[in-house]
Image: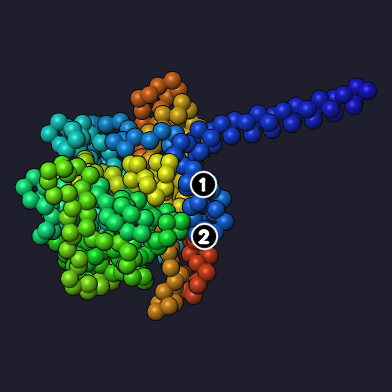
Amino acid sequence: AFVTSSIQMARFQAILQLLIVYATTCVVFASVAKSTGTEWYYNNWCGAGHEYLSDSKCAKLFPNALNREWTCGVPSKSAPSANSGFQRDTILADVSVDTTELASVVTDPDVNLCVILTQRVADASAPAGVALYNKYLCAGEYSASVAYEPWSSTKVFAMANAAGHLRTNETQCGSGDLHNHKFGLDGSVTGKHGPTQLADLATVICSYDTTAGYSSNSLSSYFHDIGWRGRINDLVQNWLLVNQNNDAEQTLGGNYGEATPSDLTLDVTSPTASSSSATTCPADKDPWPIKFPNYLSALSAGELVRRIALHREIPKELKFPGAEWIDMQNILYGAANSTLFPGQAWGGMTADTAIYTQSGVDLSNLLTKWDQDNNSQWRVFSKLGAGYSSDRSRGEIVSNAYTCLPRYEAGSTTAVGGIEFTIAARSSVAQDSSLNKAEDKLHAAMDKALQYVMANYAV
């Protein structure tokens, strides 16, 4: 009887321990992943139909609370020393890029990868009262300088360009205080659903939603119609790569394989216009829809994502020309009050179904250590790209992401450390029409790179 009781007790204790672990896991998952305003994502955007670490198991995590005015809470430091490799925010031409440190970590020749580490230094004279210092790490010189086809990852740049064009270059957008600058990505247009927020279309592009009857590719062409393909290509040459020789032939302005939706107008309605003023901007459609190839280096792609996420903190010359913070908010988060996706708070780049960065930093386990009280001040803004090039006979996957991970002590709402970075990575595998090998390579490379920067730069 004693033996039987001991066995039963051991089994009971084992089962009890499993239940405790399960309950703890569920609490963490519910408070982080299934936060308010994510129902549309879990019901419609993730699941078995996805590929390429594109959340087929609905494992994506979201912060527990949404604040669209959020800023990264990793605490400010004193200005880093000159030999640290961190440099104050400046144009790419003046940036010193370390191409050796990560080269020993990411050794796969089929992968291009760069990481931009960011430190904040309090400075009353700087934008938003903080100066940004960055350290640029690329896995080999080819990651810094060789341009590649970035696929759909560039769609967010088309949206940022459209915002800048709407606010500064339109010929018919209102008059007086409504001229140009009142019209941007916080506006609405008209389509088959009636009034449709441009920010909801940004969410379709990033989430690959199909419930609204639009495609990510066709809407990206629509934003090019608003922003003009020649304008975004000029931005690459004369703004991003200013003072540089463009030996890598980096260009933007290519379409994404589908025509613009025929139902969407180009008449943009401002949400801030008064009833006594003209409220609609008949935007000028791109008159010369010349397609420029989409080609960027990992360094350039990462820098563009960083400039979107950190629009408020970067110097004026680094901001997307003409665009305002409200435009970047709508790219990062989608619509504040969505009409296409009622109740979904996390849209835009937060709704990207790629979870490469989440996997690389082991986010679920990290949050149980760094954010035990659910301060929910972390963020991942990302955009996936993938495709098979029949011309080059290569399967490729791209992931670009900005990430902020503050670290807290239990019982405190003030971060004591953490890490802030932007990563851009591309894998390219010959004859990989299924993209399975490309996925494995990108996953492995990003895991290695992110584990390295977490171990060596997180505080």
Quarter of the image with the N terminus in it: top right
| Residue type at the position of mark 2 | Glu
Instruction: Give the colouring mode of the picture.
Output: rainbow
Q: Which residue is mark 2?
A: 51
Say whether disc 1 or disc 2 marks the residue closer to the N-terminus. 1
Kind of residue indicated by mark 1: Tyr
Q: Identify the residue at the far front of this view.
A: 276
- Which corner quadrant of the image does residue 80 belong to? top left
- 176 or 145, nearer to the observer: 176
Residue drawn 7% across the image and 51% down it: 175
Which residue lies at the image location 40% right of the left edge and 62% below the top edge? Answer: 215
Is mark 1 in CB contact (under 8 Å) with mark 2?
Answer: no
Name the disc covering residue 197, or none: none
For the C terminus, the quadrant is top left
Q: Where residue 101 sits: x, y (%)?
A: 35, 52
Instruction: Provide residue 422's location: percent of width, then percent of height.
Output: 33, 48
